[in-house]
Amino acid sequence: MIRLEGIQRRFVSDEVETTALDNINLNVKEGDFVAIMGPSGCGKSTLLNTLGTVDRPTQGKYWFDEEDLTALDEKELANFRAASLGFVFQSFNLIDELTVEENVALGLAYRRDVKDRRSRVTDAMDKVGIAHRARHYPHQLSGGQQQRAAIARAIVGNPKLILADEPTGNLDTANGEQVMNILSGLNAEGTTILMVTHSPSQADQARSRIEMLDGRIIASTSRAL
Ligand code: ADP
Ligand code: MG
């Protein structure tokens, strides 16, 4: 489903040049659950942002379902993201002024083709156990509830791929496990997941593992799908 070939991402700021991704080659099969590990600053978030097409590589090719995404313009990429991707972040990134159900509905905002929006939003909230907080605002929720609402927003459009950047990084153990169980359940239903984590036990729950260092992939292992 995913093929990266020779992906490089260089940042230049204040005349300091950083190579955040240095010749990354990666294949991910549909249905995989990949844990991405490595020390702070090694390029994990840049890799996820590249896969999410919210950051553009300075070199290399990105193929998704045989389509060369590096050839698409911004509008085409926005359509690709809306149709195929769900994002989950460490800091939840909910909109404070919107209720849970309004936040979840944002996951459909760029989709013209979607019918039955209400039932889709309700289904997504049910799936992560947050429907009973539909009319609440983010500040009225615990961290775990906020992250479940954010996952509902990520899955409401029925994405093929979920990109999760340290999704349990701000949660206690119990809530972190709950989020992992939700992600594992989504993967069992066929959603492909790439997740950045610092937790070896979470990486063990994934099917595959990538270790990064200084912008490179230094090791990768995978279990059969
Ligand atoms: P990680 O998520 O593994 O902690 P990042 O992908 O965030 O690492 O960052 C990788 C490297 O790229 C770091 O050295 C970081 O400072 C640099 N970097 C990331 N984003 C930017 C940016 N927008 N501008 C300049 N440098 C950046
Ligand atoms: Mg990061």
Image (spheres, helix red, strand yellow):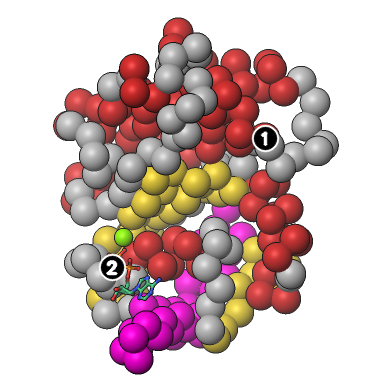
Quadrant in the picture for the N terminus: bottom right
Residue 12 painted magenta: yes
Residue 108 badge: 1
Q: Position of residue 131 (x, y in %)?
A: 49, 12
Q: Relative to residue 162, is residue 67 depicted above or below? A: below
- Residue 205 falls in image quadrant: top left
Element carrying mark 1: helix
Quadrant of the rendered image holding ligand 1: bottom left
> Residue 39 in the image: x percent, y percent?
20, 67
Local secondary structure at mark 2: strand
Q: Which mark is residue 125?
A: none
Q: Residue at x 58, y 63 (%)?
A: 53
Q: Is residue 148 visible?
A: no
The structure residue drawn at horizontal position 37% and vertical position 83%, both measured from the top left corner, is: 13
Determine which quarter of the picture holds residue 189.
top right
Which residue in the structure is indicated by mark 2? 211
Residue type at mark 2?
Glu
Mark 1 is surrounded, within 10 Å at the Cα level, by few (under 14), some (14 to 19) or many (20 or more) other residues, namely many
Amino acid type of the residue tagged 1 in the rendering = Leu
Residue beneath the point at 34% across and 71% down: 43
User: How far across and how far down the image is residue 148, in percent?
Assistant: 40, 27
Residue 47 position within the rendered picture, expressed as x and y whole percent measured from the top left:
43, 67
* Relative horizontal placement of residue 202, taking residue 76 as reference (left or right): left
Residue drawn at (21%, 53%) of the image = 198
CA gap, disc 2 and disc 1: 33 Å
Q: Which residues are magenta?
A: 1-30
Q: Main secondary structure of the magenta part?
A: strand
